[in-house]
Amino acid sequence: MRLLPWTGPEGRPCYLITDGTGPLSRRADVIEETRLAMAAELLGHAADLLEDRRATPEQLRFLLARMREALTDVCRVAESRGGRPATRSTRPTPGGR
């Protein structure tokens, strides 16, 4: 069973029984990659904002809320990938990238 990167009604986890080759598996792969890319982009934005001494409490609070969302997504992806064999897109590459 594969934990999908989205939740169902009432925030409950969604699982898929699959061999990893179907259209829903491919959609989940794309969503995982998108969420990881968005989290990486947000990290860059966070670095910039944290260096800006003029950043307001509202801007920092907004950033923190988005970081929480991104971390939740990344944790879900990590949990999902931890339960299945590595594929080409999920294998670590040299240098961690």
Image: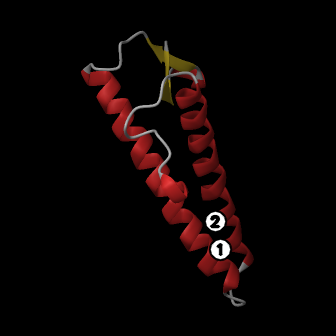
**Placement of 29 over or under 37, stated as above or below:** above
Residue located 42% across and 9% down the image:
17
Residue 29 as seen in the image, left or right of residue 83: left
Residue located 65% across and 74% down the image:
59
Q: Which residue is mark 2?
A: 63
Residue 70 as seen in the image, left or right of residue 15: right
Residue 9, image x, y percentages:
52, 20
Q: Residues within 10 Å of mark 1 (few under 14, many from 20)?
A: few
Looking at the image, the residue that sits furthest to the left is 23
Instruction: Identify the image's colour scheme: rainbow, by chain, secondary structure or one colour.
Output: secondary structure
Q: Is residue 97 visible?
A: no
Amino acid of disc 1: Gln
Front position in the image: 59 or 83: 83
**Placement of 36 over or under 10, stated as above or below:** below
Front position in the image: 58 or 90: 90
Looking at the image, the residue that sits furthest to the front is 94
Residue 12 as seen in the image, left or right of residue 88: right
Q: Which residue is mark 1?
A: 59
